Amino acid sequence: MKQVKMKASELVIDPALTKLRPINMMHVNTYRQHYRCGVDMGEIVIEHRTRRVVSGNHRVTALLEEYGPGHEVTVTEMTFATELDLLTEFAKRNMAHGVPLSGFDKKRIMQALSREGSSPEDMANLFGVSVKRLEVWSGMTVSVIGSDGKQTTEPVKNGVYVPDGVMSAEAYEKHAHRDRGVSAHLQASQLSRWLRLGWIDQDDPRTIEALKELSQAITAFFAAREKVTA
């Protein structure tokens, strides 16, 4: 390992890594404020050969947003013998500091590690969980069919139930970016309670429109359910 100085524009934010741990612009904006105040945000780690950012994608994005591509950054260069070594370092550093990984992030990283040949025991140690927990995560997947007909296996968030285990690529993209990892039972119970208590802003047109859409969806759901059980 060695430390070098580079322009922020020379650092490569790898889409393959940010797919595993997406960049959250709310956190980026927080980091921008920290940089303005002179806070030490820790070392940024890159791969020596490709300059891919292994640790610090949020921080590099914040530096680019705050100071521009010409800003000089001190980074730590590391050399990795295999892609598995790089992914393991990526996971270790994301587990150790920064914004905590969500359960969905861990599932995606676990799947990437598994594809590169990581053992269940090594992954369990990395994430601080049991091998049995990893087996549960491994079962929380769906088959995603792209527009080209190709099929991949992707993790899903807690709570989602896909009867046939298949999603279109478009549906999966919405799931990954919009859905919360909460069961339908908990979401429905909370919304019912809010409605009973009047904790709904009736002057917000987006809320009213969403509730109308929800009402229509619930009506259609029970109509379809009655046909099946009749």
Image: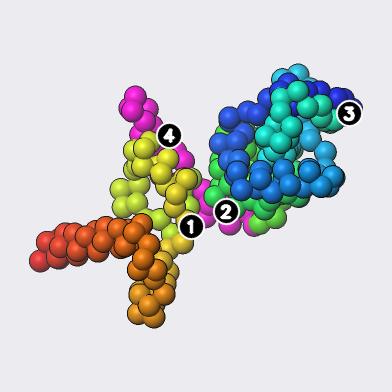
**Cα–Cα span, label 4 and label 1:** 21 Å
Amino acid carrying mark 3 in the image = Gln
Q: Nearer the viewer, residue 45 or 216?
A: 216
**Cα–Cα span, label 2 and label 4:** 20 Å
Say which label, 2 or 4, has the lower sequence index.
2
In percent of width and height, residue 56 lies at 73, 38
Is residue 136 shown in magenta? yes
| Stretch in magenta | 130-154
Q: Residues within 10 Å of mark 2 (few under 14, many from 20)?
A: some
Q: Nearer the viewer, residue 37 or 150?
A: 37
Amino acid carrying mark 1 in the image = Gly
Disc number lying in front (2 or 4): 2
Q: Quadrant of residue 41?
A: top right
Disc number lying in front (2 or 3): 3
Q: Secondary structure at mark 4?
A: strand
Q: Which residue is mark 4?
A: 152
Any mark on residue 8, and which? none
Identity of the residue drawn at 41% across and 75% down = 199
Q: Residues within 10 Å of mark 1 (few under 14, many from 20)?
A: some
Say which label, 2 or 1, has the lower sequence index.
2
Amino acid carrying mark 2 in the image = Gly
Q: Secondary structure at mark 1?
A: loop
Q: Which residue is mark 2?
A: 103
Compared across the picture, whether 68 is left or right of 22 comes to: right
How are the residues colored?
A: rainbow
Say which label, 4 or 3, has the lower sequence index.
3
In percent of width and height, residue 125 lies at 71, 50
**Cα–Cα span, label 1 and label 3:** 39 Å
**Cα–Cα span, label 4 and label 3:** 39 Å
Disc number lying in front (4 or 1): 1
Q: Which residue is mark 3?
A: 3
